[in-house]
Image: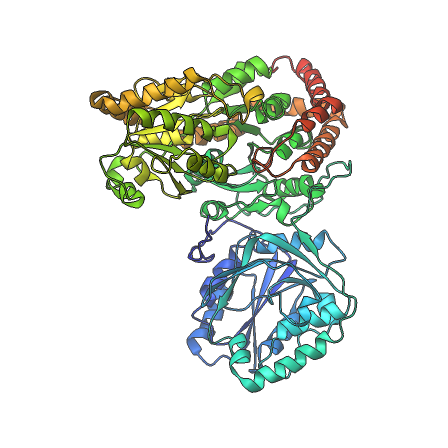
């Protein structure tokens, strides 16, 4: 997903009820000179920081515009953490140095009056510095905006810093290190004062810790800043070059930076409880739900996560997200529209600290419910969290069982820790049945909650017909079959090719349109060329808005080897497009003869994963169903009307969100749940150190997965890598899940009323 530079932080306020009167731990220092036009947005970013323990020192450097000066008093009256200092005009270095001298804390953050911060910037940097006592400053990936738009994703290189400034001024700096290097040099009016300071700190042996993966700092590019003066004035440029060269010449054998993300590492250490003892929340009249996910990527599971978090009533709920895998998080900006509390752990810490951070989050926010979904780290931590947080309800959501990975995937994990969970929600009735029949869950503890679709957004009335035909450049008389998915072995895209070949032999002008990308895209394109299907199968790539595709389509094809309940099926039905689907997972909850057709799957995921030969009868069944709908206008019309009707009867996002709002309230207030939680925690305490040992084993297993995976077709635990058979042998040799399940079985026996 392309980065959206219009989604600037500070345009709107989150107005979270965070404490504002506690002793500060960070001093933000902002030089101010006639900056009234930009300071409001910068202030919004500062006030909305998720880490509230700061003072903001605004240094008025001899401003001459009375209205701008009055704005400083407005900000000071608005928030008690604001401190305003006034001085004669002396330049940005002297203003920063005055702020440093008046700072009450050990951590300094220089922030210009026109730059912006994402809400978690302070917390990321504070965590990195507080957990690496040898590092002297911490900073994140950044982006330029306004005059120039770019993402600055440059790894720190102390030698390259001698001739190129790889850093911005905005980083969290240890005050002692900055002072020992002489702070910011005063004297020259226009020079790269931040670059010069960094060079002197590097020469003194100091080094940073750097977070890559999220641009949390926004640098405003303008024609009136100090940087523009340095580059446009020949005398300033010459003096600046001399100063930088002099500072760079003093650097010898510099220390490298600590840079995140890093490869997963774990040395059999026990999970650590945080010693944090301050609560961030000033008021507690809203329920705080903490979500533990692997990532925020395009796909049905994360679409459900986004819909749920976005849909919760902000007057009653606040939310936070922690992600636990190293992933691109291409949807992070979409999630940032729903909550400011987003922490991608791999971007600012080692995997050995994940448990401590989750504990820190619980201690600092006091969440009312922990919601786990698809996170292997999260599941491994559940018994440990239950042991140490007996009053915290813990629930999970399972999208499907995956027999090709861990012999059940996250469904198996959910079953293994089931005694420590209040409830498990699943997206379809088939998975609900699997949870009880295969993973020993009591039926009353597993509930089907369909993920739903926005029926007002996905409606044929919202889109004019014809756009897809124009994009493809084909005649409007040609019937279109949509294949919308990630091009991945689970979706069997090569079965789609076989179906397309046979349908096109019966209906000459049919067009199969592939929407999506993925690890098998290149190979699929080559296959289309080899089979001479270029005028039958068309590729559009990934699309953010696919409604126009549904609007012109006649049928949507879902021939997956495995599904929970396909998001594509929801969207297609909402748009009134019949679906021909494999009868896998929970597809039968939505797809039947009234909306299309279900086709028996003649392959098994455990044995047939990524096979390229297909049962002839299965291919023919798809072909017959598609051709029937295309050749019978009355049948197609009836199915199209049935699609929309079925969605409105019980498959909307609004219905799903309403269920969870009531469920979260019940989990918190139900006395029976509270008693069972405490009993479970007591039994786990008696079994100590079982819970932490289970976490150790899981972390070692994930390290083994990292070592054994390789990049080919794109399957696996993080959704981007293949798990070879060698890993399955490791599972059997280690016997990890057998140990896990034996321990949990003992707990179940003790809690007979519950399990």
Q: Position of residue 508 (x, y in %)?
A: 28, 29
Rendered image coloring scheme: rainbow
Badge count: 0
Point 44% across, 71% down: residue? 36
Vertical relation: 406 (above or below) 128:
above
Is 461 left or right of 119, judged from the image as shown?
Answer: left
Instruction: State the image coordinates of residue 42 (x, y, percent, origin top left).
Output: 49, 63
Work out which quarter of the rendered image holds the C terminus and state it: top right
- Which quarter of the figure has residue 435? top right
The residue located at (47%, 25%) in the rendering is: 563
Name the residue furthest left: 634
Residue 339 visible: yes
Compared to 562, does 274 lie above or below? below
| Residue 124 coordinates in the image, percent (x, y) | 62, 52
Pick whichever, 251 or 16, lies toward us.
Answer: 251
Q: Nearer the viewer, residue 709 or 682?
A: 709
Vertical position of residue 719 compared to residue 408: above or below? below
Occupied quadrant, residue 244: bottom right
> What residue is rendered at 37% in x and 29% in y?
570
The image quadrant that residue 727 belongs to is top right
Name the one closer to the observer, 487 or 677.
487
Whether residue 101 is visible here, answered yes or no, is no
> Where's residue 442, x and y in %?
56, 14
Q: Farthest residue in the bottom direction?
A: 235
């Amino acid at each position: 997903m392309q980065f959206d530079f219009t989604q600037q932080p500070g345009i709107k306020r989150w107005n979270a009820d965070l404490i504002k009167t506690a002793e500060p731990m960070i001093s933000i220092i902002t030089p101010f000179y006639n900056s009234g036009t930009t300071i409001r947005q910068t202030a919004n970013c500062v006030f909305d920081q998720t880490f509230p323990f700061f003072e903001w020192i605004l240094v008025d450097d001899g401003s001459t515009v009375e209205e701008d000066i009055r704005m400083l008093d407005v900000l000071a009256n608005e928030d008690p953490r604001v401190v305003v200092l006034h001085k004669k005009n002396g330049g940005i270095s002297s203003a920063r140095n005055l702020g440093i001298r008046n700072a009450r804390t050990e951590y300094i953050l220089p922030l210009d009056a026109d730059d912006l911060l994402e809400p978690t910037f302070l917390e990321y940097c504070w965590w990195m510095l507080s957990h690496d006592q040898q590092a002297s400053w911490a900073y994140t990936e950044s982006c330029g905006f306004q005059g120039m738009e770019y993402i600055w994703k440059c790894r720190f290189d102390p030698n390259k810093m001698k001739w190129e400034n790889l850093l911005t001024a905005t980083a969290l700096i240890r005050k002692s290190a900055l002072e020992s290097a002489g702070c910011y040099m005063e004297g020259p009016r226009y020079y790269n004062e931040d670059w010069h300071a960094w060079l002197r700190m590097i020469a003194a042996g100091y080094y940073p810790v750097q977070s890559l993966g999220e641009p949390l700092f926004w640098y405003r590019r303008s024609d009136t800043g100090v940087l523009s003066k340095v580059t446009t004035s020949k005398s300033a440029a010459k003096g600046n070059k001399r100063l930088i060269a002099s500072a760079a010449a003093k650097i010898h054998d510099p220390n490298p930076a600590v840079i995140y993300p890093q490869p997963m590492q774990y040395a059999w250490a026990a999970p650590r409880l945080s010693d944090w003892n301050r609560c961030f929340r000033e008021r507690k009249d809203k329920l705080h739900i903490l979500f533990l996910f692997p990532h925020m990527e395009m796909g049905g599971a994360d679409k459900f996560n986004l819909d749920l978090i976005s849909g919760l009533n902000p007057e009653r709920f606040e939310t936070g997200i922690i992600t636990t895998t190293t992933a691109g998080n291409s949807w992070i900006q979409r999630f940032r529209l729903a909550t400011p509390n987003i922490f991608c752990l791999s971007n600012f810490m080692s995997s050995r600290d994940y448990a401590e951070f989750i504990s820190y989050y619980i201690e600092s926010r006091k969440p009312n419910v922990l919601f786990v979904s698809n996170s292997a780290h999260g599941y491994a931590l559940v018994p440990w969290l239950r042991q140490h947080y007996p009053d915290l309800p813990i629930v999970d959501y399972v999208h499907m069982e995956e027999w090709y990975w861990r012999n059940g995937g996250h469904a198996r994990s959910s079953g293994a820790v089931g005694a420590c969970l209040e409830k498990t929600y699943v997206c379809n009735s088939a998975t609900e049945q699997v949870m009880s029949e295969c993973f020993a869950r009591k039926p009353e503890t597993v509930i089907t909650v369909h993920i739903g679709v926005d029926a007002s957004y996905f409606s044929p009335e919202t889109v004019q017909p014809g756009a897809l035909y124009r994009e493809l450049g084909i005649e409007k008389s040609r019937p279109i079959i949509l294949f919308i998915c990630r091009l991945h072995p689970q979706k069997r895209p090569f079965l789609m090719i076989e179906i397309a070949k046979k349908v096109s032999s019966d209906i000459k002008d049919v067009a199969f349109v592939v929407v999506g990308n993925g690890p098998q895209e290149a190979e699929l394109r080559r296959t289309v060329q080899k089979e001479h299907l270029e005028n039958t199968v068309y590729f559009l790539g990934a699309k953010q808005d696919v409604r126009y595709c549904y609007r012109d389509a006649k049928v949507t094809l879902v021939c997956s080897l495995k599904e929970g309940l396909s998001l594509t099926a929801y969207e297609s039905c909402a748009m009134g497009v019949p679906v021909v689907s494999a009868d896998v997972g929970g597809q039968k909850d939505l797809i039947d003869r009234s909306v299309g057709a279900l086709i028996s799957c003649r392959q098994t995921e455990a044995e047939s994963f990524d096979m390229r030969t297909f049962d002839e009868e299965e291919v023919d069944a798809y072909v017959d169903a598609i051709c029937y709908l295309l050749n019978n206008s009355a049948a197609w019309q009836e199915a199209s009307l049935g699609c929309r009707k079925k969605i409105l009867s019980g498959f909307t996002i609004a219905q799903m969100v309403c269920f969870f709002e009531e469920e979260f309230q019940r989990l918190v207030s139900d006395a029976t749940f509270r008693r069972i939680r405490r009993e479970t925690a007591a039994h786990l305490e008696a079994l100590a150190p079982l819970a932490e040992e289970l976490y150790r084993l899981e972390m070692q297993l994930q390290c083994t997965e990292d070592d054994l995976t390789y990049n080919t077709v794109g399957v696996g635990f993080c959704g981007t890598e293949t798990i070879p058979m060698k890993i399955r042998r490791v599972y059997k040799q280690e016997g990890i899940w057998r140990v896990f399940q034996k321990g949990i079985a003992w707990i179940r026996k003790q809690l007979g009323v519950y399990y």
